[in-house]
Structure formats: C-alpha cells, structure tokens
Image (tube, grey):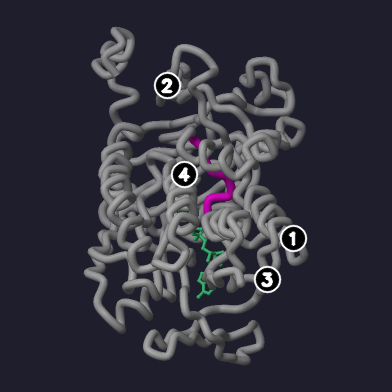
Amino acid sequence: MAKHITLIGGGLVGALLAQQLAGRGFAVDVFEKRPDPRIAGFTGGRSINLALAERGLQALREAGLADDVLQRAVMMRGRMVHTRDGRSGLQRYGVDDSEVIWSVSRGALNMLLLDAAEAAGVNFHFGQSLASADFDQRRMRLVDELGVSRELDAPVVIGADGAGSALRAAMNAYAPLGERVESLGHGYKELEIPPAGGLSADLVGRSGGHDQFALEPHALHIWPRGGYMCIALPNTEGSFTVTLFLPAHGPHPSFDTLGSAGTARAFFEEDFPDLLPLIPDFASDYDGHPVGTLSTLYLDRWHLDGRALLVGDAAHAIVPFHGQGMNCGFEDTVVLASLLAQSPDDTAGVFAEFQRIRQPNSDAIAAMALENYVEMRDSVADPHYLAKRALGAL
Ligand code: FAD
C-alpha cells in the first residue's frame, strides 16, 4: 500500500510538494484553510505577483511544469532604476537573456500547481484549517468554514502552512523548536499601475514600444529613496503591481506618519513624482490595502522526529528583498520528495537529513535578503555603486 502523507497548506510550496510526492507514489491528502481558488477566486492577500528565479524554475523543471509557468510569466532582464529627477536606467542581471528572472501572478501560479497536483492524484480538502495536533496519538483536529471540527489520523504530517504556521505552533507547544522571529520594522503596501489603455495618452510612451504597458515591461522597476523605496513588477495583462516599502513606525516618512491617502499623496508628489500619475486609483488603493509586516523566522528544529516536518515559509520565512522565499520553498520540495522516495519508511532520518541539507541554504538567503534591502533602496542609485557595476565588480 502507498505510504500516506498529510500536508497542511495548499499554497505555492504545499501544492508543488504534493504534486511531487504523488508523482513518486505517495498517497497525499492536503488540507487547505481557504476555499478552492479555482472556484471561489484567489484570495491570497499579499504580493499579487512574485519574481521567479532560476532556483525555483529548476524545481518547476524537475516537476515538469516550467514551460506551463513561463507561458504565464513576464521576463525581467534587470532592474530599471528610477531616480528622483525622473531619469531611469536598466541594470541588467546578466550579459544576455540567459540570465533573467520572471514575474508571475501568485494566484495563477497557485491554481496551475493545484491542477498539476490533482492530476498527479493528490486529494485536496479546501476550507479545512488545522486547529490542533496530538502528536502522541498521531491525530489532528481540523475546523471547516462553518466552525465544525473533526479529528483525523495523521501519522506523518508536513506543514506548508506559511509564516504563521499552525502546525509549527502545535509542534512548538509539544517540544520547543527554538523559534525566533525578527521583525524588520518596515512594512509594505501594494498599489496598482493599470494597463496603458486605462491611462491618459500623455503618460504612456515609456514602455519601449510595448503599448499595452505604461512602463518597460521586461524589468523590475525600483524607485530607490535611501531609507525606503517603491518597486513594480509587470503582470501579463499589462498592469504593474507596485509595492511601497517604508518604516512601519517612527519619524516621517513611516506608515504611521503617512496615515491615510491624503498625506500619502503629498509624500508621493514629493518623492515619487513620476510614479504617482501612473496610479489613477491611488486613494482607494492606499486606503483599501493593508500594511503588511515583514519578518525573518529562525528555528533550531524543523521536525518532530519522523512525525512532523515544516517546509517553505513555515520553516524559514524571510524578507522579500531577494525575491527568494517561494524560490527557496520550491527547492525544498525537490530535495524532500527525492529523500522521501529513497527512504519512505524512515521519515525520522529523512526529516533530519532534509534540515541538515536545507537549513544552511535558507540561513544564507535570509541574510542576503536583509542585505539586499539596503542595496535596493539605497546603493543602486549611488554613483560609486554604478561605477563599480560598470567596471564589472558587482
Ligand atoms: P504561503 O504562500 O503562505 O502558503 C501557505 C498556505 O497555507 C496558504 O494557502 C494558507 O491559506 C494555508 N494555511 C495557513 N494556515 C493554515 C491552516 N491552519 N490550515 C490549513 N491551511 C493553512 N518569494 C519569491 O520567491 N519571489 C518574490 O518575488 C517574492 N515576493 C514577495 C513579496 C512580498 C511582499 C512577500 C510578503 C513575500 C514575497 N515572497 C517572494 C515570498 C513568498 O510569498 C513566500 O516565500 C511563499 O508564498 C511561501 O510559500 P508557502 O507555500 O510556504 O506559504
């Protein structure tokens, strides 16, 4: 009989892991808190689009899904840096298009991964939230959208339930995991540049001949302003998702001092004068979208012997400035599925080996992501930095 694995969370990492485990002959059940996004619409709540890089793309290649994903992605050749005086310049990631990253919609990608996992034989249970776990009895309790709870056997459970993981909380209560959450102290808010057709004609024309887009589509746009910044990633239908990163509290400018859209508009007029006219629904975007928080999660232990394991953000949530959280989680899935396929009956050994292999990598990317915030919001506009890049030193 196929070895059974219970997964908590059918987000990006959970869906890809489920597809790979089912493809290797495991019987996989996934319990996902939200309703099925393919029926109810996607309600991810944060970062509408993401940068997919080689690390994550390689995992998708191994899962046989890379071509499907790339068909729904926009290539980004480098960083387009917009200075305060309205000039812009592209800093390429590589000498040619063999070194690029891709902008993908979180919702479209999640739905593609759910379809692929289902086609591989995975059973999804939507609207089912993990409420508690009894690791001695190897059982867990789930609550549905109406608040009705039920208990199930779950001898081997893997948590892909994100940065606020309920499985992690249950594991930590049973045997402390050495959890540390370091808040960045900066938050983010998302705004939207619509496709060029939705903007007045005099604002369009900076897209390098791509008439559907208000800006050059094949770039990750950055407006670096020292202690804070805006970025924008393209979407396939011609819009861009803009993210403002700013201190959460403290002296101006911070999300505290900006308050509502009125003050925020004055701040944008001063600091992002070329960007503001491209966001026609600025007031409703600003007031309607929440301020997201940013933290790095460190754990001493990712597993409870062979009974429970954490992957993706549940194990190693990082700040988004290297665009590597999902990519790193995708890499987790390849390593874990391959280890489990080799030793399906030794989950304790596999989980320990998984942490041994993956933790040094996730620690390294966590540190690089923190460093890259300073680089993106500050150094990329520094003349010394640009001179070094021109000489090939960066
Ligand atoms: P999640 O995507 O959080 O998915 C967790 C899933 O578990 C969700 O579906 C949730 O509904 C479900 N769930 C939660 N609790 C329960 C429960 N109790 N029971 C059942 N189900 C539950 N990464 C990149 O690689 N590139 C980027 O450009 C990038 N940009 C980012 C920008 C921002 C602003 C942010 C905040 C993050 C960004 N990331 C990026 C990081 C990326 O979003 C995460 O690393 C990625 O989503 C992690 O996937 P995951 O499946 O582990 O967790």
Helix or strand or loop: what does disc 3 sit on? loop
Q: Residues within 10 Å of mark 2 (few under 14, many from 20)?
A: few
The stretch in magenta equals 46-53
Seen in the picture, residue 195 relative to 174 is either above or below; the reply is: above
Q: Does the residue labelled 4 lie within 8 Å of ligand 1?
A: yes
> Do the CB atoms of the residues marked 4 and 1 lie less than 8 Å apart?
no
Q: How far apart are marks 3 and 1 (CA)?
A: 9 Å
User: Residue 63 sits in which quadrant?
Assistant: top right
Of label 2 and label 1, which has the lower sequence position? 1
Does residue 7 appear left or right of residue 73 in this picture? left
Where is mark 2, residue-wise?
A: 85
Where is mark 4, residue-wise?
A: 327
User: Residue 211 sits in which quadrant?
Assistant: top right
> Do the CB atoms of the residues marked 2 and 3 lie less than 8 Å apart?
no
Where is mark 3, residue-wise?
A: 35
Give the number of the mark in front: 2 or 3: 3
Give the number of the mark in front: 3 or 4: 4
Q: Distance between the residues labelled 2 and 1?
A: 44 Å
- What residue type is disc 2 on? Asp
Total count of labels = 4
Give percent across and percent down for residue 348: 35, 68
